[in-house]
Image (cartoon, rainbow, N blue to C red):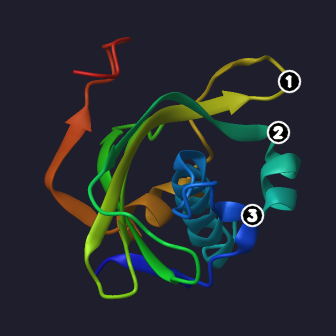
Amino acid sequence: MKFQVNFNTKWSDFDPNRHMRHTAYNDYAAEVRVRFFQEHGLSINEFAKLNIGPILFKEETSFYKEIHIGENITVRMELEGVSQNIERWRFAHQIFNKDGVLSAEIKVFGAWIDLMKRKLTAPPAKFMQIFEDLPKTENFKEIPIKSKKIIK
């Protein structure tokens, strides 16, 4: 089962062409990631206590169908890849318009950073179950640990 959130869009999400501005799609994808982690006990405050945070290396957005002012959306999220130690990850998001038509896909490639050392880090063991619970894409692949290259 996919993790998804329904959103009421707001006026500031739209541009002068009366469709959703391109960066608003990415904002909603980020919000879904934050909500997933919050629902699994990893709030912003918990990340602060652990001195770790997510960083993005790459964000790809593909647009398919306009979302217009007044339309509400549904955003789904799945895990597309993760390293064995959960240091690195790939998430895939799909954004659907009010009629359930796929409007955009967003893929993010990232990792966890130690906020004190400012270096990549593996998260605490409790992240293992959280990532295990994440819905996976059909093309889910493990990210090789030895590889410093994240995007293929």
| CB atoms of marks 3 and 1 within 8 Å | no
Q: Distance between the residues labelled 2 and 1?
A: 7 Å
Residue 119 coordinates in the image, percent (x, y): 68, 17
Q: How crowded is mark 2: few (under 14 residues within 10 Å), some or many (20 or more)?
A: some
Provide the residue designation for mark 1.
116
What residue is disc 3 on? 12
Cα separation, mark 3 vs mark 1, equals 35 Å
The answer to whether marks 2 and 1 mark residues whose Cβ atoms lie closer than 8 Å is: yes
Q: Which of 37 and 74 is in front in this view?
A: 74
- The amino acid at mark 1 is Met
Name the quadrant of the C terminus.
top left
The residue wearing badge 2 is 51
Q: Residue 146: x, y in percent?
A: 32, 14
Q: In this view, does 142 lie to the left or right of 124?
A: left
> Going from the N terminus, do you reach mark 2 or mark 1 first?
2
Residue 84 in which image quadrant: top left
Report the side of 149 relative to 69 (left or right).
left
Badge 1: few (under 14), some or many (20 or more) residues near its Cα, within 10 Å? few
CA–CA distance between discs 3 and 2? Answer: 32 Å
Q: What is the secondary structure assignment of the residue under circle 1?
A: loop
